[in-house]
Amino acid sequence: MESKRNVLIVEDEKNIVDILRFNLQRAGYDTIEAYDGEDGLARAIADRPDLILLDVMLPKKNGFDVCRALRERNDNVPVIILTAREEEADKVLGLEIGADDYITKPFSMRELIARVGANIRRTAIAAPALPSAAAAAMPVSGDLSINTDSHQVFRGGTAIDLTQREYELLVFLASHPNKVYSRIDLMEQVWNYGYVGDDARTVDVAVRRLREKIEEDPANPVYILTRRGAGYLFSVTRP
């Protein structure tokens, strides 16, 4: 029998924690709770949850600092930022420091449960790195290659450190070379849900972060190109 997935709730408002706990447990998840950022970080490290619901405005250590600390430890647990703020800059900052998703309060519980499920489903356990991983990688364009067995990406034979989401985005685009996908297409295919509106900004940030890692000159990309008004494509020059 498959064990239940654990969701860590880091939120200082007890009534919100109670509501989240009730609904997550009813949806089949086990929960862990923390009421400040320091305890949330400690529980994330000690309990290794499958996903974290992380409030931004927390006592002792804010949610951005908690997320940043986890990513600096190379912990790629999916993180969904919970914020009451409407400012675009706050949402973008969460994504820039490594959060996988965000949801703005007040939110519907149905939407939140859907996002929790989508992010957990999209998190694959990468195979251990193998000494021959670079040699076994499949060239996709130029000096860029992907080993789908070890979930590793290489440029010029050197491994590139990608988050799971960045890896999935690259593999999806590279699997459909020279085909343009809109932001909504990518939200559906890579993020596994079809929300629109501000969520499209999530795709832009992920593409920018990915370019910074795989492109020699991110300002003038050769792999992931933008088609203004249409979307993004993975460019492969035909012989």
Image (cartoon, rainbow, N blue to C red):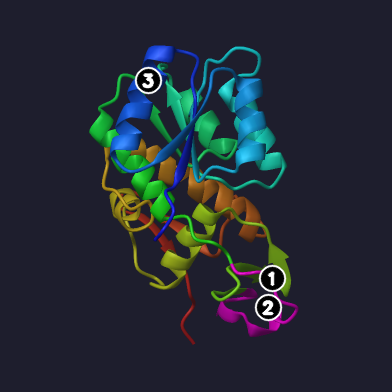
State yes or no: residue 48 in magenta. no
State yes or no: residue 133 in magenta. yes
Q: Secondary structure at mark 1?
A: loop
- CA gap, disc 1 and disc 2: 7 Å
- CA gap, disc 1 and disc 3: 40 Å
Mark 3: give few (<14), some (14-19) or many (20+) Cα within 10 Å.
few
Reading the image, the residue beneath label 3 is 18
Q: Nearer the viewer, residue 116 or 178?
A: 116
Q: Secondary structure at mark 2?
A: helix
For residue 133, the mark is 2
Q: Earlier in the sequence, mark 1 or mark 3?
A: 3
- Would residue 202 appear left or right of 113 to someone viewing this image? right
Is there any visible trace of residue 232 in the rendered image? Answer: yes
Q: What's drawn in magenta, residue-wise?
A: 127-144
Marks 1 & 2, CB-CB < 8 Å contact: yes
Q: Secondary structure at mark 3?
A: helix
In the rendered image, residue 79, in percent from the top left (x then y), is placed at: 50, 38
For residue 129, the mark is 1
Q: Quadrant of residue 142?
A: bottom right
Q: Amino acid at mark 1?
A: Ala
Is there any visible trace of residue 86 in the rendered image? Answer: no
Q: Nearer the viewer, residue 105 or 22?
A: 22
Q: Nearer the viewer, residue 179 or 193?
A: 193
